[in-house]
């Protein structure tokens, strides 16, 4: 079930969003916001791991390269740590 969320945005952000809607990138502001939030959640899954995972990572011993790779692939949906690092560098 969808829920309605009321929020305030700076005028500049709304102008950019309206421009994307008027160009046909999105059908509405709602669709634009939904797409942007979904993309952010996909790009930053570590933000939503929960306290248990954060505690596990904070209290775990140093990981070997293979263990780090396996953990990274689990957390980031199959992307290797090397791919994530390369992606991050390409965004600069």
Image (spheres, helix red, strand yellow):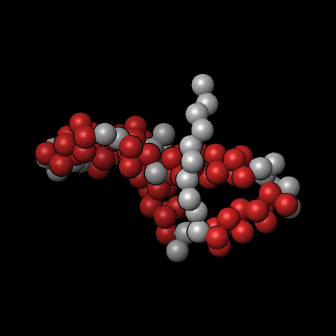
Q: Residue 6: horizontal and vertical position, in percent?
A: 57, 48
Residue at 64% over, 51% down = 33
Which residue is farthest top? 1
- Work out which quarter of the rendered image holds the N terminus and state it: top right
Q: Splitting the image into 4 quarters, where does residue 38 fall?
A: top right
Position of 87 compared to 61: left or right? right
Indicate whether 43 appears above or below 90. Answer: above
Residue at 48% over, 40% down = 78
Relative depth, front residue between 19 and 61: 19
Q: Splitting the image into 4 quarters, where does residue 56 fall?
A: top left
Relative depth, front residue between 72 and 45: 45
Q: Residue 49: horizontal and vertical position, in percent?
A: 35, 41
Does any portion of residue 76 appear in the rendered image?
A: yes
Q: Residue 9: horizontal and vertical position, in percent?
A: 58, 63
Position of 76 compared to 12: left or right? left
Indicate whether 71 appears above or below 22. Answer: above
Position of 59 compared to 63: left or right? left
Which residue is farthest right? 23
Q: Residue 27: horizontal and vertical position, in percent?
A: 81, 48
Relative depth, front residue between 29 and 80: 29
Residue at 56% over, 59% down = 8
Marks counted in the figure total: 0
Indicate whether 40 appears above or below 78. Answer: below
Does any portion of residue 66 appear in the rendered image?
A: no
């Amino acid at each position: 079930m969808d829920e309605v969320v009321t929020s305030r945005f700076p005028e500049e952000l709304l102008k950019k969003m309206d421009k994307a809607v008027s160009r046909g990138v999105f059908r509405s502001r709602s669709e634009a916001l939904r797409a942007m939030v979904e993309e952010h959640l996909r790009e930053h899954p570590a933000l939503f791991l929960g306290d248990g995972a954060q505690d596990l990572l904070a209290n775990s011993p140093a990981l070997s390269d293979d263990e780090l790779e396996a953990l990274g692939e689990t957390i980031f949906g199959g992307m290797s740590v090397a791919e994530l690092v390369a992606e991050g560098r390409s965004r600069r």
